[in-house]
């Protein structure tokens, strides 16, 4: 009888944010506005990086790739989330839940790998400025982005296949997306192996790249301290500060969800932290880079003036 009940779970429903209709509508509008802001701001950076010749350098190629990842990453989560906020009875089929989990983990992992690649790029730019363009060729940059996507997809495929090989005893996900920890809580039987694999993937995606970033910045600091002029040291540190702020925000939030001991994990805490890396991180990334980068601000300004000039009088 138990196995018969397990096979009946063909779709999931998400935990409602609120049961009050007016609150649901307000949350829908808030999340929609945040989503549109994330898409427009990241798409703007991606657009100027692609079209403005002054930004055709490895650093901005990686920044444009990061913005493209943020657009895809947010789009995987938010439209389904908006549907469930608008109608709390909206269900997602198990296959669609698996697809969302795969793309969410794959793109989030690629995001983390790409941040490590960007740290290496900054190290090469500061440590070997004269050979920078010879080392960071366009071909190498493309391969590094492709490798980030490939590794993220490979790890995600393994984890998603392992999770959805399980039978499920409940259909309500205590979350707003098909993330691994809340879906695992619905599984029947032991999930000890799955938790171990999840922790291992978390280490591969978060801890290893973060250690590489720390190593890159240690070498960057050592190189900067050898610069004799105070102006040169300030310029070098300034080029790295935006990236470092994004790294701390991204890895801090994800580490709290995926690398915390499960015995001390509260479901509500995971749910709240997930809101940060679903909305706040993709929203702040373009703001951090655009407000602290003169080249990006000038390119955006030129793009706005070109758009205004092309309007019919």
Image (cartoon, helix red, strand yellow):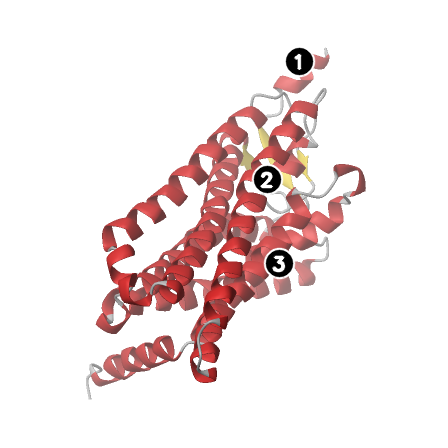
Question: SS at mark 1?
Answer: helix
Q: Quadrant of the N terminus?
A: top right
Q: To which residue does mark 3 refer?
A: 276
Looking at the rendered image, the disc whose residue lies closer to the viewer, 1 or 3, is: 3
Residue 186 location (% of width, % of height)? 69, 30
Q: Is residue 152 above or below residue 240?
A: above
Decide: marks 1, 2 in contact (CB < 8 A)?
no
Q: How many marks?
A: 3
The picture quadrant where one finds residue 165 is top right
Question: SS at mark 2?
Answer: helix
What residue is rendered at 50% in x and 40% in y? 100
Q: Earlier in the sequence, mark 1 or mark 3?
A: 1
Q: To which residue does mark 2 refer?
A: 203
Q: Is residue 75 visible?
A: no
Q: To which residue does mark 1 refer?
A: 4
Looking at the rendered image, the disc whose residue lies closer to the viewer, 1 or 2, is: 2
Pointer 3 local density, CA inside 10 Å: few below 14, some 14–19, many at least 20: some
What residue is rendered at 41% in x and 62% in y? 122
Q: Is residue 195 above or below residue 165?
A: below
Residue closer to the observer: 182 or 289: 289
Q: Which of marks 1 and 2 is nearer the N terminus?
A: 1
Q: Distance between the residues labelled 3 and 2?
A: 20 Å
Residue 87 location (% of width, % of height)? 60, 49
Q: Outermost residue toward the bottom?
A: 313
């Amino acid at each position: 009888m138990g196995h018969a009940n397990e096979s009946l779970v063909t779709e999931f429903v998400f935990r409602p944010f609120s049961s009050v209709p007016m609150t649901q509508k307000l949350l829908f509008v808030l999340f929609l506005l945040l989503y549109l802001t994330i898409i427009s701001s990241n798409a703007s950076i991606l657009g100027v990086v692609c079209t403005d010749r002054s930004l055709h350098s490895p650093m901005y190629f990686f920044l444009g790739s990061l913005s493209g990842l943020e657009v895809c990453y947010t789009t995987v989560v938010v439209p389904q989330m908006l549907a469930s906020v608008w109608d709390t009875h909206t269900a997602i089929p198990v296959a669609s839940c698996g697809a969302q989990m795969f793309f969410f983990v794959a793109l989030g992992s690629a995001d983390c790998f790409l941040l490590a690649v960007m740290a290496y790029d900054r190290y090469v730019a500061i440590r070997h400025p004269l050979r920078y363009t010879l080392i960071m060729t366009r071909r190498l940059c493309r391969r590094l982005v492709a490798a980030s996507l490939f590794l993220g997809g490979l790890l995600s495929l393994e984890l998603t296949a392992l999770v959805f090989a399980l039978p499920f005893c409940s259909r309500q996900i205590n979350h707003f997306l098909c993330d691994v920890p809340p879906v695992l809580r619905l599984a029947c039987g032991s999930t000890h192996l799955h938790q171990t694999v999840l922790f291992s993937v978390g280490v591969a995606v978060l801890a290893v790249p973060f250690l590489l970033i720390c190593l890159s910045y240690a070498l960057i600091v050592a190189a900067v301290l050898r610069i004799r002029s105070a102006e040169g040291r300030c310029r070098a540190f300034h080029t790295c500060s935006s990236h470092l702020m994004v790294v701390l925000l991204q890895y801090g939030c994800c580490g709290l969800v995926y690398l915390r001991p499960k015995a001390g994990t509260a479901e509500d805490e995971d749910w709240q932290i997930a809101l940060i890396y679903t909305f706040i991180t993709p929203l702040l990334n373009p703001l951090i880079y655009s407000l602290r980068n003169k080249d990006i601000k000038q390119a955006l300004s030129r793009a706005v003036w070109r758009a205004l000039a092309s309007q019919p009088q």
